[in-house]
Amino acid sequence: MDRARWAHSGPSRDPDQSPVSLPSHRQSPARAVLSRAALASVLLILSTLIVYLGRYGYRDAARPGQPLNLLGSAYYSAVTLSTTGYGDIVPVSSTARLVNTLVITPIRVIFLIVLIGTTLEVLTERTRRSWQISRWRSKVAGHTVVVGYGSKGRSVLTTLAEAATPPSELVIVDISAMAMAEANRSGLVGVTGDATRREVLAAAQISAAQRLVVAVGRDDTAVLITLTARQLNPAMQITAAVREAENEPLLRQSGADQVVVSSEAAGRLLGLSTIDPAVGQVIGQLLGRGRGLDLTERAATGAEIGHPARDAAASAVAVLRAGEVLPVDGDGTGPLLAGDRLILVGAAAAGPPRPAGQR
């Protein structure tokens, strides 16, 4: 993600146009116009052929005594279907008048319906979308906002999907309209804009969100987004990624609960894979669900409290206590306490699912 993508000024936007975009499989207004224009053209061609086949039953003021040619038939069809009716070409034979009554008139009605339907659809598209967005805003709560739809953001969404997070509980924020179009095609709600701006995060209903994931490419941008989001929602869980370890304390001071140093994590994994390839392979499996090894988290049950973590759950690898991660066999860990959470690994890690938004 380059510097220009998350410039603080943000892109210009029609003030009447909402930055929120909902997933939709409906035709776009432009495509609807093109499809209806194609249908109208077919109707015009059909009418022209019908008139031309009965050309001897028409009188053309511009060519007295001569049958209609193909151009005259097209001209007559155009002015007739559009209800203009100049009167310079008229049906004079009984057959031509009958064809106009039984065939051309219904075609004209269909032609007008196509034109009116196109106009109405284009005019009502924004109203319909505005109503859908208002309805979404009234219902969305407890969702997860993911800022950044780059490689990191998409990996976050893949992990959330593997954890059975429904798409309806996800909102994507990115400054790129193309990224939002891709997110919408994937069935996700998107907000287009600079996430360092309060109004963009407000459009993502950040005040009602349970979790925020900041997956942008610049550390200073991540800090600004975290600061802004924490002001708008002091209670939600914020997880953010930074490239450099020296920026981790700053991000935590800005309000992030969890910080992932992407360059350091990648470098350590590369080092482990170089020294001990099998260890690197195991860590790679732990990073994804369903690959043989899974890491999960659950609260210690009442029956487990008071017992050592290893005795309570053989697959436990760590204890989360008051925001601090403790090794299960550490000297300072001791027996499990009320409020402790267990980190488990492997197939035996299945336990009570972690509540959505658990901090």
Image (spheres, rainbow, N blue to C red):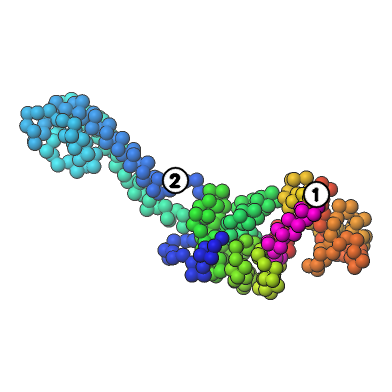
Residue at (74%, 51%) from the top-left corner?
A: 284
Give SS at disc 1: helix
Q: Indicate the position of residue 172 as horizontal and vertical percent values.
A: 57, 58
**Occupied quadrant, residue 304:** bottom right
- Indicate which disc, 2 or 1, sits on the residue closer to the N terminus: 2
Camera-near label (2 vs 1) is: 1
In space, the residues marked 2 and 1 are separated at their CA atoms by 50 Å
Q: Amino acid at mark 2?
A: Gln
Answer yes or no: is residue 6 visible. no
For disc 1, the marked residue is: 278
- Main SS, magenta region, reads helix
| Residue 332 circle label | none
* Left or right: 40 as drawn, with respect to 344: left
Magenta residues? 258-276
For disc 2, the marked residue is: 27
Answer yes or no: is residue 13 visible. yes
In front of the other: 151 or 171: 151
Q: Can you say whether 205 is above or below 253 in the image?
A: above
